[in-house]
Amino acid sequence: MSDALHLLSATEIAQRLHAGTLTSRALVEALLIRYRNLNSKVGAFTYLSESDVIAQAEASDERRKQGKTLSSLDGIPVAIKDNIAVKGQPLTCSSKMLAKLISPYDAHVIEALRAAGAIIYGRLNMDEFAMGSSTENSALQKTYNPWDLARIPGGSSGGSAAALAAGFVPLALGSDTGGSIRQPASHCGVVGLKPTYGLISRYGLVAFASSLDQIGPMARSIDDCELLLNALASPDARDMTCFDQGQRTLLPPVAVNQLRIGIPRGILDKGVGQEVAAATRAAIDFYRAQGATIVEVDLPSSDLAVPTYYVVATAEASSNLARYDGVRYGHRSSQATTPVEMMTLSRSEGFGPEVKRRILLGTFVLSAGYADAYYVRALRARSKILSEHLAALEKVDMILTPTVPTPAFKAGEKISDPLQLYLEDIFTIPANLAGLPALSVPCGKSQHLPVGFHLVGAPLSEKKLLAASRVFEASHPYRHQQAPL
Ligand code: GLN
């Protein structure tokens, strides 16, 4: 049996741990063997301390023996994207700038996972500072899609999605500013949720674009995604955008035959690949057959989402990344003779090309004389996108689209064309601009590559989205298929 432990969902693992037919240590040892054999091919992890994860597993087994199990996550490994702080471990954001940084503290989500008894399991590769859609912007290493090692896993949480699809770990954390949880989830055939803005504390998440960034759960099944979400979503005064206890009541799920699903008019004509369109239509037909009401909705300003995002996100990034000046921490150039030269060279040497492009763009759109033409207009477009979504979500429970227009592309294929790459997020970005919860659910294949559909709901409708997709998952055995590694 131990050779198949990597196929188990977290929910199944929890049952076996509880029944005493599995120990956390045996699970972790099986996962470590898989990691040793396959991580060099997939490149999902950038750091993993075997002795540390074994010690955490033993501590969990000991608690279980004494009847002091902390939660249903006790003894279950969760791998962490490398922009979320874990005390005593690297926090590189896959950047040369932070290559030597060891985090002095735990993020809120890490504290929450430790309190639940979860095993904090290694660091996952990502696009540098979470900027990208293929994980090719990592300054540390390449990550490949477990379904086809010639292809990218998506990004920026590419390490997280690849680790799940490769069976390295049952659960992972990602972060999502414009689609970085959902797009790689779609490309790797796993589930990824970006929560409502404010549901999960970002204390200990390295900031990219603060009005958009969220941490979220990634898993191989809907139940697992919900299990992890529940552990992460708690109040935290250290992130002032994080909801208080009184503000975080989630909307109740709706039975599938009561469900109203909105489809944006003409959505499948927008550069969507044939097989992706077919898989999305099949998902819509499935819901219709289950008794859900399918209606067309109008979201005309969504066409502005990508340009709006690349103004707002880069503006915020240029400000957030100003702190990496070679003075307090991070890379410091050894070539400089004056303080100004030191700062200039430290930034020139420490940041990669995409991060530099974003800082330049963000500085430009905020600069005197241009801010009104770019930044202020983008904010106006953003509020239109929000009001159109809220109006549509008065009439429907959720909006369904593909997650990404096309399946995972070949490594290197889009590296010299950033604008092409920006279009990967055309369906995911509106939810970030509007602060709404959104979920990617595996729904089929385009040739041999997974594709997902995307659900967006009203604020705090996570349970509705999860319940609706659970119905789909239950009748699509696809969910537990593993990448052919
Ligand atoms: N791909 C988008 C970008 O490059 C989104 C990234 C993210 O969500 N972190 O900015």
Image (cartoon, rainbow, N blue to C red):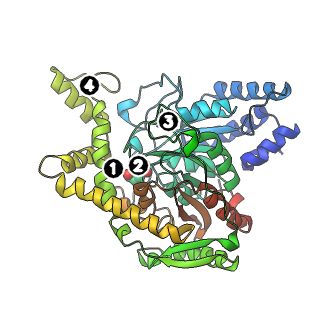
Cβ(mark 1) to ligand 1 < 8 Å?
Answer: yes
Q: In x, y percent, where is residue 421?
A: 37, 59
Q: Amino acid at mark 3?
A: Ile
Cβ(mark 4) to ligand 1 < 8 Å?
Answer: no
Dot 1 or dot 3, earlier in sequence? 3
The alpha-carbon separation of the residues under discs 1 and 3 comes to 19 Å
Q: Are marks 2 and 1 in contact (CB under 8 Å)?
A: yes
Q: In x, y percent, where is residue 139?
A: 39, 40
The alpha-carbon separation of the residues under discs 3 and 4 comes to 25 Å
Q: Are marks 3 and 2 in contact (CB under 8 Å)?
A: no
The alpha-carbon separation of the residues under discs 4 and 1 comes to 27 Å
Q: In x, y percent, where is residue 71?
A: 74, 36
Q: Residue at x 78, y 31 (%)?
A: 69
Residue at which label 4 appears: 333
Dot 3 or dot 2, earlier in sequence? 3
Dot 3 or dot 4, earlier in sequence? 3
The alpha-carbon separation of the residues under discs 4 and 2 comes to 31 Å
* Callout 1 crowding tier (Cα within 10 Å): few <14, some 14–19, many ≥20: many
Dot 4 or dot 1, earlier in sequence? 1
Nearest the viewer among 329 and 70 is: 70
* Callout 3 crowding tier (Cα within 10 Å): few <14, some 14–19, many ≥20: many
Q: Amino acid at mark 2?
A: Leu
Residue at which label 2 appears: 212
Dot 2 or dot 1, earlier in sequence? 2
Residue at which label 3 appears: 84
Cβ(mark 2) to ligand 1 < 8 Å?
Answer: yes
Residue at which label 1 appears: 313
Q: Are marks 3 and 4 in contact (CB under 8 Å)?
A: no
